[in-house]
Amino acid sequence: MTFLAPERLWLLLLVPVLLAVYVVLQRRRATYAVRFTNLALLDRIAPRRPAWGRHIAVGLSLLSVAMIVVAFAKPTGPTRVPLERATIVVTIDVSLSMGADDVAPSRLDAAKDTAKRFIEQLPTQFNVSVIAFARSAAILVAPTLDRTAAYRAIDGMHLAEYTATGEAIFTSLDAIKLAPPDTAHPGEPAPGRIVLISDGKKTFGRSPYAAARVAKKRHIPVFTIAVGTSDAVIDSHGQQIPVPVNQSQLKRIAQLAGGQSYIAGSSEALSAVYDNLSHSFGFTTEEREITARFVGYALVLVLGAAVAVVLYSSRLSS
């Protein structure tokens, strides 16, 4: 947490000063009671009462002063705020291994169906781009608000050879550059997010790690989803070829690019991942002033002190 007016925090010294004054007054009160020789009369005049109520009231009051001073210093902190606009790139692996049926009805079909539901859940003001990759990567739909175009592009995907994961990320970064500018803020690029769905590691093209580092520099996180299980096979010319899902490379890509990695071994798990992403993509974390939060803390403490005073006073009058 930082402060816009940190010099005002010096006022926090009032808290220990006030506490010291309170302690001194309590000691004087105790000394007076000891010096009063007629103890029976003292007990009738000022019978002893538990001091916890008074101490609690004073403690809460001092804490409220501290909270008010902190609020006066204009604190700032990470705050989750809704995004007004963003560009989401859905990048889907269409390599031959995505034809495995360990994720029903197949890895690719499950990825396509859930990708469309994911896009449907995104805020309507978000631009969506669709990319398919195998030996190379292609922008099927440039960033657009037209959801129908995105659905049509996803439906038209078909299997091909190789897995050029690095090319997929570089092409996704190029796609984000095509997002239409905001007329209200033409000089400010919209936030970008890349969702990369794949089942294996790169077999062709440039390094996906180099691409992830470029995405990190551009502040565009890459969220990877590994689709499939470890014992999947595909049929190739009558031969059963193992195509186990490879999580390690996708996880490393997400780490390097500042995103998150997920594993989906079923269509239901894949849907759950997309649901999680669709909710989180509507917000971002920014450093903002949180003065109101500490004013609220102070208000709660003041009310607590008031309750303690009322309870203590009622005990004295009983």
Image: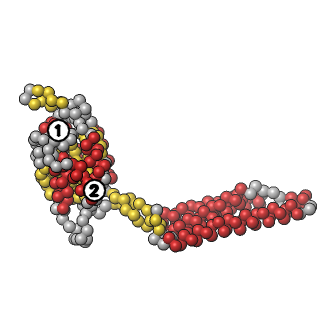
Quick one: 85 or 303, which is closer to the camera? 85
Q: Residue at x 25, y 68 (%)?
A: 188
Q: Position of residue 299 (x, y in %)?
A: 56, 64
Q: Position of residue 289 (x, y in %)?
A: 43, 67
Label 2, on which residue?
Answer: 216
Between discs 1 and 2, the one toward the N terminus: 1
Quarter location, residue 246: top left
Q: SS at mark 2?
A: helix
Compared across the picture, whether 153 is left or right of 115 comes to: left
Image position of 6 (left or right of 155): right
Quarter of the rendering occupied by the C terminus: bottom right
Residue sitting nearer the eye, 144 or 318 = 144
Instruction: Give residue 66's mark.
Output: none
State the CA–CA distance, disc 1 to disc 2: 27 Å
Image: 287 above or below 242: below
The secondary structure type at the circle numbered 1 is helix
Tell which of 27 and 184 is nearer to you.
27
In this figure, what is the number of numbered marks?
A: 2
**At 27% across and 59% down in the image, what residue appears?**
217
- The crowding category of the residue bearing disc 1, from other C-alpha atoms within 10 Å (few below 14, some 14 to 19, many at least 20), is many
Q: Amino acid at mark 1?
A: Met
Q: Position of residue 235 (x, y in %)?
A: 12, 30
Q: Position of residue 98 (x, y in %)?
A: 17, 38
Can residue 208 be spotted in the picture? yes
For disc 2, the neighbor class at 10 Å (few under 14, some 14 to 19, many from 20) is some
**What residue would you read off at disc 1?**
98
Q: Quadrant of residue 247?
A: top left
